[in-house]
Image (cartoon, rainbow, N blue to C red):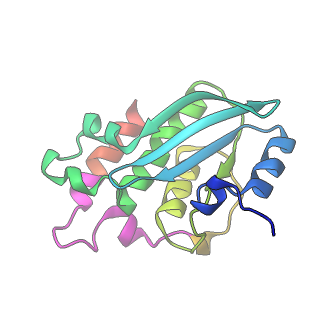
Amino acid sequence: MKTLKRRRKEMKTDYNKRIKLLKGKTPRLVFRKSNKYILSQYVISNEAKDRIIFGISSKKLLDFGWPKEKKGSLKSIPASYLTGITVGKKIIKDKLGVPVIDLGMIRKEKKNRAFAFIKGLIDSGVKIKSEENIFPVEERITGKHLKNDFSQIFSKIKKTIMEK
């Protein structure tokens, strides 16, 4: 009987997918969702050794004007989108190569936080191929669907990020 590796049992690593990503020799953009934040890292692999070039968390949105009283929503769809824009701006500014998106063990359901993040990357200017029907609708991205309409704050934060 075959014993599963510990990280596979914990649903943290898909080793077959990881080997394919490493053989591709292209940089990858790792997207992870924690209990509080959206995390993203630009990673280059050399001989199965990962080197993180930069990492950005949705906690950085507090510097761009995210309201402190809404600190608990830094893992929402609007936060994912704005984090994607921030990462995309950094990739373009530093003239890094176009990465492959590594979603890890996150379920690839359409219109979720991961695809809002990718939409943010595309809107910032990173050339990633994708279909339009996988992204959340504009109402969800801007936060109009929330109890307290978040769209005015969202547009101010987006403008601040785009200017930097």
Picture coordinates of residue 151 (x, y %)? Answer: 26, 61
Identify the residue at horizontal 66%, vertical 51% (top origin). Answer: 101
Picture coordinates of residue 64 (x, y %)? Answer: 28, 37
Residue 76 shown left or right of residue 51 in the figure = left
Residues in magenta, as a range: 135-154
Tell me if residue 78 comes above or below residue 90 in the rendering. below
In the picture, residue 125 is in which quadrant? top right
15 or 67, nearer to the observer: 15
- Name the residue furthest right: 23
Tell me if residue 115 comes above or below residue 80 in the rendering. below
Picture coordinates of residue 11 (x, y %)? Answer: 59, 61
Identify the residue at horizontal 17%, vertical 47% (top origin). Answer: 67
Q: Is residue 77 shown in magenta? A: no
Residue 88 shown left or right of residue 126 in the figure = left
Identify the residue at horizontal 81%, vertical 48% (top origin). Answer: 19
Query: Is residue 148 shown to the viewer in this render?
Result: yes
Tell me if residue 64 comes above or below residue 79 in the rendering. above
Q: Quadrant of the N terminus?
A: bottom right
Residue 22 shown left or right of residue 50 in the figure = right
Query: Is residue 120 shown to the viewer in this render?
Result: no
Q: Quadrant of the C terminus?
A: top left
Picture coordinates of residue 62 (x, y %)? Answer: 26, 39
